[in-house]
Each structure stands twice: as structure tokens, then as C-alpha cells.
Image (spheres, helix red, strand yellow):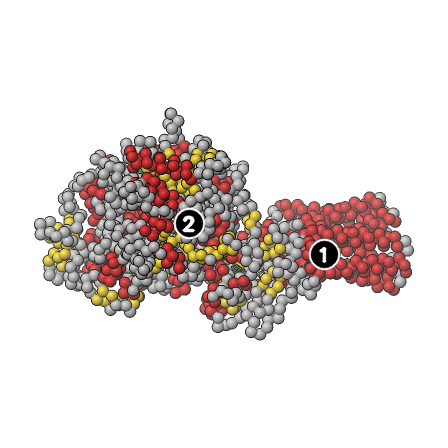
Amino acid sequence: MARTTCYMCACRCGIKVHLQDGKLRYIEGNREHPINRGVLCAKGSAGIMTAISPARLSTPLRRIGPRGSGSFEAISWDEAMRIATDRLAAIRASDPSRLAFYTGRDQSQSLTGHFARMFGTINFAAHGGFCSVNMAAAGLYSVGGAFWEFGEPDWEHAKLFLLFGVAEDHDSNPIKLGLGRLKARGAKIISINPVRTGYSAIADEFLAITPGTDGLLVLALIHCLLEAGRIDTEFLIRYTNAHHLVIDAPGAPDHGLIARDAAGRELCFDRASRALVAAQSVGTDPALSGRIMLPDGRYARPAFALLAERYGDAQHSPEAVAARCGIDAPTIRRIAAEIAEIAFNQPVVLDQPWTDTAGRHHATMTGRPVALHAMRGVSAHSNGFHTCRAIHVLQMLLGAVDTPGSWRYKSPYPKPIPCASAPGRPRVPGGPLDAPPLGCPRGPEDLLVDEAGEPLRLDRAFSWEAPLAIHGLMHMVIARAYESGPEKIDTLFLFMSNMAWNSAMNPGETTRMLAECDEEGNYRIPFVIVADAFASETVAYADLVLPDTTYLERHDCISLLDRPIGSAHGPGDAIRVPVLKPDRDVRPFQDVLIDLAGRLGLGDFADDQGRPLYSSYADYMVRHERKHGVGPLAGFRGENGLASGKGTPNPRQLERYIENGGFWRYELPHEQLYFKHANRAYLAGARAMGLIDDDAPIVLQLYVETLQRFRLAAEGHAVPRPPERLRERIIRYFDPLPIWYVPLEEAMTDRARFPLHAITQRPMAMYHSWGSHNAWLRQILSENRLYVHQDLASELGVADEDWVWVRSRNGSLRCQIRTMRGVNRDTVWTWNAIGKRAGAWALKHDAPEFRRGFLLNHIISEYLPKHGDDAPHSNSDPITGQAAWFDLTVSLEPCAAPSPEDTSPRWGANPLHIRKAPEGAR
Amino acid sequence: MTMLPERAPGAKKLGLVIDLDTCVGCHACAVNCKEWNTGGEAGILPDYDKYGPQPDGVWFNRIHSYETEEGGCSRTVNVPRSCLHCEDALCVTVCPTGASYKRVEDGIVLVDTDKCIGCQLCAWACPYGARELDEKAGVMRKCTLCIDRIHDENLPPAEREPACVATCPSRARHFGDLADPESEVSKLVKARGGLDLLSDLGYRPTNKYLPPRRATVPSAPAPPPSPAGKGLGAALLKLLDKALSR
Amino acid sequence: MRPAASILLLTTATGFGFGLLAWLGAYAALGLLPPEAPVLLAAGITVSLIFASLGLAASVFHLERKERAWRAFTQWRSSWLSREGVAAVLIYPVAIAFGVCFWRDGQSLCTRLLGAATLIGSLGTVYCTAMIYASLKPIRQWHNAHTAPDYLLYALFSGAVLFAALRTVLLGAPGPMASVAAVMAAAAFAAKRAYWRHIDGQAPLATLAAAIGTPNATAKALDAPHFSENFILRQMGFAIARRHAARLRHLALGVGFALPLLLEVLAGVPIAPLTTTLLALACAALGLLIERWLFFGEATHVAALYYGRPV
Ligand SMILES: Nc1nc2c(c(=O)[nH]1)N[C@H]1C(S)=C(S)[C@@H](COP(=O)(O)OP(=O)(O)OC[C@H]3O[C@@H](n4cnc5c(=O)[nH]c(N)nc54)[C@H](O)[C@@H]3O)O[C@H]1N2
Ligand SMILES: Nc1nc2c(c(=O)[nH]1)N[C@H]1C(S)=C(S)[C@@H](COP(=O)(O)OP(=O)(O)OC[C@H]3O[C@@H](n4cnc5c(=O)[nH]c(N)nc54)[C@H](O)[C@@H]3O)O[C@H]1N2
Ligand code: SF4
Ligand code: SF4
Ligand code: SF4
Ligand code: SF4
Ligand code: SF4
Ligand SMILES: [Mo]
């Protein structure tokens, strides 16, 4: 029996793997593990079948047929490494950014990102860009943490839980455990979701919201709370910037910025001394309303006053938004009242003294037991950044951030706002980047744009098209590489992401782009390297395939530098250890990447003489130091393994992890468990552990001044400035207070023609495309249907299993329907990523995944409709570049059952044909 | 032996209590059950056409989803379906070979696959669809209540529970002795009005299902809206007037 | 329920066999065996045992593990299937003894007693078969007061038709068996119609809501646990379209009972008795196979509720 970490999805559960005669016998949850406490989901339990899947790649491959044909020859690792090294060395010698390195749900970003940084390419991103960057960005810029996998409700104490747009989420098992606990305690769960399945099925109240309108709902809740005077003003002045004075001088270059004193400290108006004082000073009575004269004679207003004025307006009343949201006004009012009742009349008081950063001693920890959580239902819309901001603002108004009973930070969060580093750029041409390639711009000066204000990055992240694209624009990578041609990008290096298929908008076009040549017969995207463990759709489009092991055959590191297993109870990280020996000629990708970095002589991976520093990923995990004393693994550091967080490398570190069940976890002392953003002991401890650089309080941003900086630049008050064509857009969307607008694509689409919203959900028993080659999981879900509200179905005259055409402005697809009641009347939906390209995943040619599965992606475009003379914008949130998967609107047209009964579109099969390596080539 | 045993005084009635109010329909219990039981004492649970057009196999536990409507309130209900270890288990008495039997000591209904002739009559006799034929081995299979876990002395006591119970992420599954009114499961059944599925058929299942609940948090009355356009009501102004201390 | 060929064959063939045997036994028990009987009886017993054996062979064919078939004899205390097996096996020596006794002694007390035993044994076997189905509570079309008498009636009907044909083949005329068969056909016809009226008027055994533990709600199936048909659906989810069923019902009534009735009347007149009795036999066999197919095909299993199928 070995203890390691599951990787049938990104949730990072601890598992115990039992072997019998060297073969997998049983995988069970590790009861000691903090993430899953012994439980295991359907995917995790099916790991055995993934380990023997026929879709596993078994040898490095070099393309011999046309791209996309699936024709390869088996080559040796020596040759594969030589090809990759030569190619990358040449790129590096010219312009490192001609390497575009994009990765998926790999949990190795601390390594892959560092590779990109040392290689010197700005063209790197991982997963978050097509996933939920709206949540990350809105959270990091508002509260220094985020929903997603970076925060969690206080499952033990919450009395009311509001869940916005979540079907499954990354914390698959923790959320289920938490919901179970809420249920056991009789807490109330409200799900706001167009679809009532899964978590929403067990919610005590289900609000079938119209997609894309959560912002309206939340702002209406805020309206009601303001109206009733039910907000936590003390929380606001102590922990947020509600009292900070916002300069009110329209047209001035600092209009909308926070007024500061000479020392650069934010100002507030102290009602006790009737003076302007540093907002962070203690013992004051800051004004939250009014208009205050600044020393220079101009006026300023507390941020809260702006907020109250805006959301107090009747346009935000429940009555004004009800029809649009699909939730009636009395319900919205009742929910606001329930929130207020529980937050203010039923606080949770823990008998736990603590001291805040102002030095005030508190005898108890008192919290508002209203917990909020949101994910892709909010984020995957082009108005998701502001919607998520609205939710955070609601939390702040309630005083429900990291308090008992509310939403809590998971360690290593909170982090300073905005996060520590701006996106990296090369200091010297061809050299490494000065910071990791992904970071948080603090203003226009941090953007990666040229003199004309045009994007430097391939995916246009950190440009005026998507200034806060802190995770990159993954969904645009292939389209932009195709568009910009070989001058910009030489090699597209994809790891653990099926970017030509289920994470592509419009996979048909995407695969065409990958396979297209110019007149001379050269591919528009010159070279494609794919590192994958299985025969995915994307593998068929590679020139070079680097076959990875499965998760039971390698070391991995779930690092604090990436997405660790920390919880509100403290930091933690984990490892994977090889349990099985690969029976194929495959290598762990991380080993390969470190080998490649060594061969290329990259800094931090090779010494001055260009000699590789690390023999393997396991070696790197133990010995690499990112900063002094800080390495990939935070546990068991120091000579004797007693140091946590920071400490010299410990050569026996991995053994200590293994002894400990494959993970390390640090339990915070009770006084540090809440109010982490302003908890003196917590911040000091986190700093000592290397989680943050500085133990200053983290001031929650009710009002995000950073956004205003971009707006001022667009108004011509700062440099750099956006190109003319984008100015209005920046001015409109970079509002420091949450706004709501019709999602971009929806606003540009003729709703009379496409009256229905179309969205997807995660099936609990499948992980994207990973599960279809798993003999057990595919028994559960081998095809998918389009779910339609019963009333809509009767109107259209269709019933269960009937066929329809689903049309959007981007194209049409044909599929079968299933009717249900628990869905918003104007919304249709399906499970994500079930449809497969014939030939992929080693499935037989007539597999239902090919014939009756379908992807909504086929009728989603990565571009918005063209407007004006400007080139079409990407189908993304204008602030973060978040892929707007759920903005899609469609129409349904019943049709006769086709013969054969296949979904449409379908492509010809392109299974892998592998020419064996000649004898002795190995 | 195919006759149902006389219930000995003090004998256990081991079974599951499944909370329909908490089950999110994740299939974890179903897959973990398959994983545990394949290769366990039950032998390999077969799969047919693993990578082809008709993927199918033997499962002891399967998860359905339904939509229900009651008193104007509609909801989605996920229902895991496995053997209920009935007291009046017709599946046992119809068995011509004695392969199906109900254990005296704990009421578990089992199939002795060494005796089974695969006549399938027991599957016909089960109203819950809990028995599935192993078309490879030609014998009937069903949930064993993880008899090889719950009585395994080598396991730490906390782990002596069925695989599906141990793995259920939302803790919607409970295992225990339903003959003992003091057991946790009996108390749950009592507190939550645990039900027999298809009680009219008279199989007297041991497993109980806890019906979905209504919200337990009393709704607060909503204050009437203040006059249109006057969002910044008196209540807020009063609140903002209060002295604060930073 | 899926109409498996082996079971259709089993129940119809044993119906003919044990039905014939029952008539032979009844005749003997009542002392009515005609003088030319030894040949007829020998042939009758042989033919009926061939039919019974055919049926039983088919039933073994239905078993997945044929080599263990012997185990099926052990649980007669509770299992109708086991009882059927035991009874079917016990009837062989009895029937053979009955034949031998008559051959040797003619109409003796021993013959009459063995005849009675054969009658009881063969009808008992048919009853056991019927009870296998009638005892299955989850299947309302089987678990009712019709199933057992109907099975007995169809066995007697098919046995009479077989007897009439056999007698005509051997003795040139059906004798009273034509009338008996005609009466039986009429009775079977009526019984089948009564059965269909009964099952058509039955309420479903349960509602989906009761099946899923929300008895006071209305319920609709949303998602099944799997997309491919599984064992349960293959066996118990079998559904036949109403229109299709109605046609088959007419066919079963017409071919299985009405035609034999007519033909037996003709045979009794007698008009071309050899042709009519043999034709009646063929019709009865075909009709009963259709009837049996419907008996399965129209039966719904309450477990199919879970898949949202009507039961
Ligand atoms: N089993 C499983 N787990 C997974 C994954 C998987 O593939 N399988 N993928 C992982 C990944 S990469 C991610 S990003 C997470 C995502 O996890 P989730 O955030 O749960 O993502 P989705 O399944 O896309 O669910 C989005 C939900 O939002 C709802 N929704 C859509 N539009 C709106 C809206 O406008 N408003 C509201 N309120 N709701 C809306 C949908 O109905 C759906 O229930 O899951 C992770 N976990
Ligand atoms: N319509 C629609 N489209 C969506 C979404 C949606 O909600 N709706 N969601 C979006 C979101 S949030 C995401 S995150 C993306 C996900 O999209 P992708 O990142 O493309 O998702 P996967 O299918 O998980 O692809 C992962 C690849 O990793 C490979 N893989 C699995 N295990 C290993 C391993 O151990 N090693 C290596 N090297 N490779 C491995 C798999 O074979 C597969 O090719 O999809 C996006 N696409
Ligand atoms: S949620 Fe499931 S698949 Fe994901 S890590 Fe945990 S057990 Fe594995
Ligand atoms: S659920 Fe079915 S198989 Fe299990 S004991 Fe009851 S009748 Fe038998
Ligand atoms: S299939 Fe096996 S267990 Fe079931 S009744 Fe027949 S012999 Fe008994
Ligand atoms: S008790 Fe064991 S055998 Fe029965 S369903 Fe649960 S895991 Fe499967
Ligand atoms: S594991 Fe638990 S929550 Fe998931 S389907 Fe089974 S009973 Fe329901
Ligand atoms: Mo994602």
C-alpha cells in the first residue's frame, strides 16, 4: 500500500493505493488527508481503469503524415529530446518569445512557469485563462484571495450558504463534504443557478437565474441591505477601504483615485477630530458619507458614499431587475432579509481572543454566518469580473470575509492587493524574465504592450484588450498563433491540455488552423509539441509528442508556489510518488522539462558551465530554492526537517512526506484562524513562513483604485494610453465599483433570432476529456443530451430523445434532447466535454462518444461579432480576458431523427497510426 | 439455504441508510463499490464492450436522478439503488439452488456464486433491480454489504464499513445495525422519517431512505421596499450617523 | 419481461407434454381407457415425455451454468423452480410405471392409481411452473389469480389437442378427444380474454414516487445511471408497443384457440380428422407460442420504474 495524491482531477485528494502482485487492486481515500478525509469521488475510484487505458501513449512520436492525420513514427527519447532541444535552442537564440508554452490543469505551474521565465518567453499561461480568471482577478483585486480553490466557506459555522453558479468546482470532495456538514447541521443552502442538478439538487432553495444576470441579483441584494441599513459599518472601516476618500474632480488626472497625504498614505475624514487623517490610523471615527474638502480645496467622497449612492438607486431595486434575472422581486427581498437576519441577529461568537493589526485585543471572534461561494457560472461570462466583484462587495458589506461562519481564505491567502509581482518581461533581450510571466498589473505601466499600445503577448494578455488577464487567454492561443503566423510564433508547446478540442472555442476551426499551410506548403504554426499521457484529439495535431506517465507512475509536487492543499486551517502541500513502474517507453513530463531546461542551459536549471543542476523532478522538488529557504515543498525543511515554510533544503524531505502520507500540513493556532487579513499573529506567522513578504494589514478593496488608473489612462491622463479604438471600452468597463452589463456576445446578437441561453456543466463523474477512455466512467456517461425546459419543449413540440438543431450565430449542431423542469425556462444546457472526435482516445470507431456525444464548443466562437472597423474582439471579459463560454445564445429547431442517428458536426476519424521504430533504434 | 432464517433474538440487521436530502448524485459510491468488489471476495465484476459502442458491466449500486414535485415545490432527487437486504427477500426464497441466502446473524443477503446456476429468477423476484447477472461467469451478483470489509478484523474498526459509505463525499450514506434502536442509523431513521422503498410490496427492506427535507431556516419577513428612488433610506442614514471606532 | 426463446419453448412444450400425460392419467384413473389403448398409451406417454423433455432441455439451456443444474433440485422447500424440477423428474418414473402397469395388467387398480398419480403429478408440475411466475410479486401481469389456473388450462388444452391428433394418427379418429379439445379451446379462449381484461384493468403496481422514497410527490426520471442498456433493462425493461401487442393478441386468440376449436369441431364431425387434428395441433402450438411470448412481452417489472418506464 502506498499513499499518494489522486490526479483523476485537480482536487488533490489523498489516496491509499493497494497493490496485489504488483498490480493495482484498490484505491481508497486517505482518512488522514486534510482535503478529502477518506472520501473519494467516482473519478478517483476509477483510477485503476485509467492506469490500464488503451489510450495511454507508449512512446515518443514524430509526425510522418500530414498534421492531424494521426500518422506518426515511434522514436527514441534521445531523438525526441534532440529534436526539442535543437528547436528550442534556436528559438532562444533569436527571440525566446517565439516559444509559446501553454499548459492545462497540470498543477506544475511553479515549474512550468519558472521554465518559461528562465527561457525568457512572455508567452506562457496555464489553465486559468479559459477557466475562471474572472474569479481570481476579482478576488485578488478585491480581497486578496478568491473563490475557486483559494477560499472556502466556514462549513462548521455557516448558517446560510449562497452558492452561485457551481456544478462541481475544483474542490470537488471538500465542497461535498462541506455541503454534507451544512445539511447535518440544518443550515440553509441557496443555489443560484439556471440548472438544478448536483449541488443545486440538494439546495433548500433554488433560484433558476437567467444566465449572465447574477450581477443584477447581487446588486439588488445590496440595494435591499442598504435600504434597510443592514450593513456592518464597523467591519467596513476597520478592514476595507470604504472610508477612503475618493477624489471627486471630474476631468482631473487623479479623479477617482484615493486622496493621499504627502507620505502616500490614504486619507479618511475623522468625524471625531473633524480632520483628514491617514485612513489606517487607529481610534478614529471615519466618515462613510458626505463630501469632504481636501487641503487643495477639491472635494472627495468616502468610497462607501459612492457605493451607497450607486446601489441605492432604484435601478438596482429588486423590482427593476426581477424580470431580467428571472427571479421575482419578493423573493429577492426575502433573501436579502434572510441574509440580514442571519448575519446580524444570529452572529457566531467563538470564545477565542485575538489581536488585530491595529493592536486591538478582541476577547472573541465574532462572525457573520453567511457564506458565499461562486464559480464558473459567474466567471464564464464576459461580465463575470464585475459580478464576482459585486459578490465580494456584498461580503464586505456584511462583514462576512474570513469571519466565523463566513467565507474564509485558504492558506497561503490572503495576499497583498494586488498580488506581489507584475507580469514578467525580459530585462535584457533574450534573457530570462524579471518576474514570473503571469502577475498582477498595478496600473497601465505594467502592461505588456508596444509603443502603439498593441499587445506583445501572443494571446494579448496584459494588453489593452484584456489588461488584467492574469492567467492569459488560453482560448485564443491557437487562433492568435495562426493569425500572427510564423513571424511571431515558431513553436507551440502544449502540455496536458486538449486545446484543439474541448478547451477550444470552435474546435473545427481550431483543428483546421493547426493543419493549415501557406502557399509553400509550410504550416502556419511551424511546430507543435504536445506533451500528453493519452491519445487526445490534440495529440493528432502534434509534430512531436512527448508521452507522459500516468499519475500513479511519477513524482509530482502540489506546491505552495502554485495551487497547494492549504485550507482555512493552515498551509499545506503534497506530493505524488510513483506507485507503478511504467510498462511503456514514457517519461514523467516534469523530468523531461527539467532535462530540457538543463540541455538548454537555462538559469536555475543549469550551472554557469551549462551543466544540468537536477537529475529529476524529485531532485528539483527537494533542492530547488525559489527564494532563499523557499522551495517547491514547504514542509519538513531544514537540515533536520523541522522547519515549516522556510528553511534550507532537506535531503530527506521526500521520505518525510512519504512517511507522513504524502502531504504536509501546518495547523494554524486558533487565534490565527479568522480575520487573517488583519490578524496580527496570522500575518506575522505567514511572513515568517514565507507565505507573504510583509505583515501589513491587507485592506479589502470595496473600491478598486487600480481599475480607475486604467480608466484615467484611457481618458488621456496617464501613459501608456490605450489605442484610440479601445479607449471607450476601457472607460466603460474599468469602473472601480461593480457594474452590470449585458454579456458582450449577447448584446451583439439578435436575441429575436437566438432567444435561448446555452451553457454547460461539469459532470461529477467525468473530468473534461480525461474520463472517456476509462472503462468504468464511460459506462456512466458515454453520450450527452441537450436539456430543455419541459414548457419550452412542449412549445416546440419535442419530447425526450427527439432531435433538434441548435443554432447560434457561429454555426449549428444537431443533437438529442431531454426535458426537465429544474432549468431556467430560457436556458438549454448539456454536460461538458463528452463529445469526442472519432478516432481519439483509442475508442472503437462506433463509440457513442463520437456518434451521440457533442460539444457546445462547436457553435461557440473565439471572436465576437465584428463591430465598426476594428478587428473582432476575442470572446472574453474585457477586463480579464476570461473566456466567455456561457455567453452563448441559441435557437432550437426540431428535426427528424437523422440516419444514421449521429450528432452533427462530425469529422472523419483520425486514430493514431504509429510506425514502429526500426529495430535497435532505441 | 433458501428458506429465510428465523430472526434470532438479538440478531443484527445490518444495512444502509441513504439520505436523499444530501445525495448529490456523484456516482462515487457506485464506482468505489465496483472497485472494491471487483477482485474482492465477489470476484471480478465484468465489463462488456469496454471501449466500444455499448459500454456496460455489472454494478452493485447505480445512481439515478429524478425530478419530483410536491405541494408546488419541485426538486431534483438523486437516488442510489442497491440491494436493500430485505427481510422478506423473495429473491432468496425463489432461488432453486440455495445460492441465494440471507444470513442469520446479520441479515445480509448474499449469493454463493459457487452454487449459482444463473437461472436469473432471483433477479426477477427483486423489485429493486438490485441483482445483475455476470454474463461472463454466468452467475448472479449483488451487493454484499461489503461483508469482506465490515467483518474484517484486520481493518481498523473505523474502516469496517462498506466501501460506498466510506467513500461518499457528502456523507449521505450511513451504515449500521437497524435492529438496534440505539444505533446511529436507527436514530437517524427515527429523526428523519426514514422510509422503505416500495413498502406496499411487502419486502420489508432493511435499508432505509431519508426523504428530502424542506429548508429548516425560518425565513425572515422582508421589509417593504422604501419609496422608489430613495434607496438611501432613513435606516441607512441613521446607521451612518452612529459613531464608529477604527 | 424479455421473452427468452428457451423459456417460451419450456413452458409451451411442457404444457403439451404434461397436458397429454394428464389426460392419459385422467382416463386411466376414471377407468375409461379404451381397449386398443396399450399402443395409444405407450405412444402417448412417449410423446408426452418427449415434449416434457424438450421443454426441460430448453429450460436447462436457459441456465448460465448448465453443469450445475442438479443443484436446482435442492430447494423444493421454498422455491417453485426447484419444485418444478423435482416434480418434473419424479413424473418420469411414475408415468413409465403407469404405462408398464397398463401394458401388463390392463385396467387394474394399480393402473388407476398410477394414472391418478400421473394426472396429479403432471398437473402439479405445470402448477409449479405457473407458480414460478405467479409468485413473482414485482410482476403484476403474473402475480395474480389467473396465472396458475390459466397455465393448467392451457396445458390441458394443448394436451387435449395433442391427444386428439395422436389418437387420430394411431386410431384414425380422435374419439371423444375432439370434443374435449374443443371445449378446452373454448375455455382457454375465454380465460385468455379474461386475463387480458384483468391485466389491462390493473393499476400499476407502484408509482415511481413510491419507488424512490418520495411517496407523496409526483416524479419523473431525469437521468439514468448509464446510457447503454444493462442487464436489468434487457431483462426487465422489455417493452412492446400497444398496437403491436393488440395485433399479437388477436393472432394468439385466433390461431391458438379459435382455429383449433373450429378444427376440433370439424374433426369431431368427423371431417378429414387427420388433417384437422394435426392442423389444430400446429395452430395450438403456434398460437400458444405467441400467447407465451405475450405473457412475457406484456409483463412489466416494477424495477423498470427506476428507469422511468411504465409498469
Ligand atoms: N467532475 C469534474 N470536476 C471538475 C471538472 C470536471 O471536468 N469534472 N473541471 C474542473 C475545472 S477545470 C473547473 S474550471 C471547475 C469548474 O467547476 P464549476 O464552477 O462547477 O463549473 P461548471 O460545471 O462549468 O458549472 C458552472 C455552473 O454554473 C451554472 N451557470 C451557468 N451560467 C450561470 C449564470 O449566469 N449564473 C449562475 N448563477 N450560474 C450559471 C451552470 O448551470 C453550472 O451549474 O470544475 C473542476 N472540477
Ligand atoms: N463549452 C465549454 N468548454 C469549456 C468549458 C466549459 O465550461 N464549457 N470549460 C473550460 C475550462 S474551465 C477548462 S479548465 C478547459 C479544460 O480543457 P483542457 O485543459 O483541454 O481539458 P482536458 O480535457 O482536461 O485536457 C487535458 C489533457 O490532459 C491530458 N492528461 C490527462 N492526464 C495527464 C497526465 O497525467 N499527463 C499529461 N501530460 N497529460 C494528461 C489529457 O489526455 C488531455 O488531453 O475546458 C474549457 N472548455
Ligand atoms: S475529487 Fe476525485 S478525482 Fe479529484 S482528486 Fe479527489 S478523488 Fe481524485
Ligand atoms: S433488494 Fe432485491 S436482491 Fe436485495 S434482498 Fe431485497 S429483494 Fe433481494
Ligand atoms: S440466478 Fe443463481 S442466485 Fe439467482 S435464483 Fe438462480 S441460482 Fe439462485
Ligand atoms: S455495501 Fe458494498 S457492495 Fe453494497 S453497494 Fe455498498 S459498496 Fe457496494
Ligand atoms: S456517493 Fe453519496 S452523494 Fe454520491 S451518489 Fe453516492 S450516496 Fe449520493
Ligand atoms: Mo477549468
Q: Is residue C100 visible?
A: yes
Q: Which mark is residue A554?
A: 2
Residue drawn at point x = 28 percent, y = 48 percent: A137
Asked if the residues shown at circle 1 and circle 2 are in contact, with their CB atoms under 8 angstroms apart, the answer is no
Q: Are marks 1 and 2 on the same chain?
A: no
Q: Is residue C229 left or right of residue A186?
A: right
Residue drawn at point x = 65 percent, y = 65 percent: B1
Q: Is residue C183 visible?
A: no
Q: Amino acid at mark 2?
A: Arg
User: Where's residue A745, x and y in %?
Assistant: 34, 40
Who is closer to the viewer here, A600 or A307?
A600
**Which label sits in the foreground, 1 or 2?**
2
Q: Is residue A93 left or right of residue B184?
A: left
Circle 2 SS class? loop
Who is closer to the viewer here, C308 or A392?
A392
Q: Which mark is residue C151?
A: 1
Chain ID for label 2? A
Residue drawn at point x = 59 percent, y = 62 percent: B110
Dot 1 alpha-carbon crowd within 10 angstroms: few under 14, some 14 to 19, many 20 or more: many
Q: Is residue A626 left or right of residue A271?
A: right
Q: Which mark is residue A406?
A: none
Establish if B194 lies above or below A510.
Answer: below
Which residue in the rendered view is the most extreme toward the left?
A296
Residue drawn at point x = 82 percent, y = 49 percent: C165
Which residue in the rendered view is the most extreme toward the top?
A519
User: Where's residue A278, x and y in %?
Assistant: 14, 56
User: Where's residue B154, x and y in %?
Assistant: 50, 65
Q: Amino acid at mark 1?
A: Tyr
Q: Is mark 2 within 8 Å of ligand 2?
A: yes
Dot 2 alpha-carbon crowd within 10 angstroms: few under 14, some 14 to 19, many 20 or more: many
Who is closer to the viewer here, A631 or A179?
A631
Chain ID for label 1? C
